[in-house]
Image: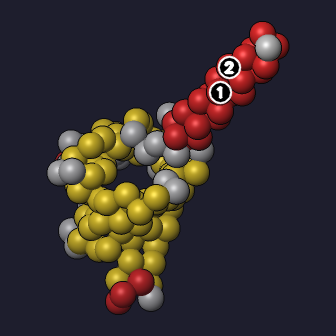
Amino acid sequence: MKNWKAVARLATATAFIAVTTAAHAASPYGNWLRPSTGGEIRAFKCGGGLGLKVTKSSKSSNVGQTIMCGAKSKGNGRYEGNIKNLDDGQTYSGIVQVNGNALKLSGCVLGGIICKTDTWKRK
């Protein structure tokens, strides 16, 4: 009987670790680096959802700007909301997809017909 309890505790602990690791891997929160430009953003809770703020940019006027706030979780590391493009000042329908240490950020127009996507790396 003692061995059964030990096995049950080990199985429970293993399941807990697997679930918490998977949840952490899909978390968008923290700092992200855009390899192509060296830009950086911080993902944080904002307006009841996900927010993104520029923390480093080649354009000093972009630093400190929130480009997304209130993006809603759709499950499996996917968030949807509006995102501001600092290059043209326009706001687009945005999708954030987190996959481990990669964050894919897409901005779309015309109902998702035309999209621009960039992949950021966890810092």
Name which residue lies at 58% across and 51% down.
99
CB under 8 Å between discs 2 and 1: yes
> Percent position (x, y) of residue 28?
43, 45
The kind of residue tagged 2 is: Arg
Say whether residue 3 is left or right of residue 14: right
Nearest the viewer among 54 and 31 is 31
**SS label for mark 1:** helix
> Percent position (x, y) of residue 21?
59, 34
Name which residue lies at 29% across and 74% down.
92
Q: Mark 1 points at which residue?
A: 12
Nearest the viewer among 7 and 59 is 7
Where 49 falls versus 123 (above or below)? below
Q: Name the residue under label 2.
A: 9
Say whether residue 40 is left or right of residue 51: right
The kind of residue tagged 1 is: Thr
Residue 2 is labelled as: none
**SS label for mark 2:** helix
